[in-house]
Amino acid sequence: MNTPYLAAAIQLDSGTDKSVNLAHAEALIVQAATQGAKLVVLPELFPYLGNLVTLKQHAETMDGPVLQKMRSLASEHGLVLCAGSMAIASTEDPSKVLNRSVIFGPHGQVLAAYDKIHCFDINLADVKTVESDFVKAGSQLVDTSTSIGHVGQAICYDLRFPEIFRRLTENGMQICLLPAAFTDKTGQAHWEVLVRARAIENQVYVIAANQCGMYGDSIRCHGNSMIVDPWGTILARADQEKPGIIFAEIDLGKQRRLRKELPALQHRRMA
């Protein structure tokens, strides 16, 4: 797609009531589409964000009601819609779920589905979580051509692993879709730096849709959803505490010019 278009990142404060979360997400998707967005990205675990131990009981299938609703919204409004991520029942390991991000096309078709590769297993003084106890890690990178450009997918903690973004770029990624529930503790130090770094070093747009507010018993999300261009400029940024929508123009012609004028991707040398 050569014509610039509007993209939207939706920031949510998801909780444990799936019906409330889904209604809020739907309202903001419709609002984004009404304001002209052609690409919309939701945050990680948008239908249910609670203690990880309860994640499995809220898991669905690809034909479940949440993704059926996302499919219909994409079709009704002619969107490329990244349905953030959600817990999908694992057939390989029934004791765990997959943390899956699904992209729907403007006709309601599934364009791609990515299972989070890097589980959030950390042991900081005031943030401790072992996502791998409840989530089966994915094993495949995912990128796909769409009507709005070649997109790659990553989820939250993946942001800390630059090698996967480089591989996606080598596969043709122009826009990275990054649903997240990035914590405030780590986000204050690293969120902006990492999002901008991934954009700069790969000369891609990064649409990072984050959660805000509390989840579980004690973890606060960082908010600050961002849309960053291939130069590393923050085109739009959300509030730290409030749900809402941010918009920015995606101009793939501008990206091509930058890659031509500053051909860093072609200058790589493996010593």
Image (cartoon, rainbow, N blue to C red):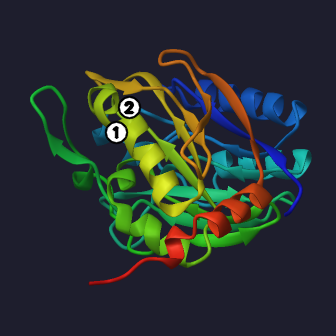
| Quarter-of-image position of residue 198 | bottom left
Q: In this rendering, would 253 be left or right of 41? A: right
In the rendered image, the vertical position of residue 268 relative to residue 110, given as above or below: below
Task: Look at 76% across and 59% down and name the residue there.
Answer: 252
Mark 2 near mark 1, Cβ–Cβ under 8 Å? yes
Left or right of 38 on screen, residue 212 = left
Q: Secondary structure at mark 2?
A: loop
Query: Residue 34: horizontal and vertical position, in percent?
Result: 89, 31
Q: Is residue 221 left or right of residue 2?
A: left
Q: Which residue is mark 1?
A: 54
Q: Amino acid at mark 2?
A: Gly
- Which type of secondary structure does the marked residue at label 1 adopt? helix
Q: In the picture, which quadrant includes the N terminus?
A: bottom right
Report which residue position mark 2 lands on. 50
Residue 141 shows up from this direction: no
| Front residue of this view, candidates 77 and 269 | 269
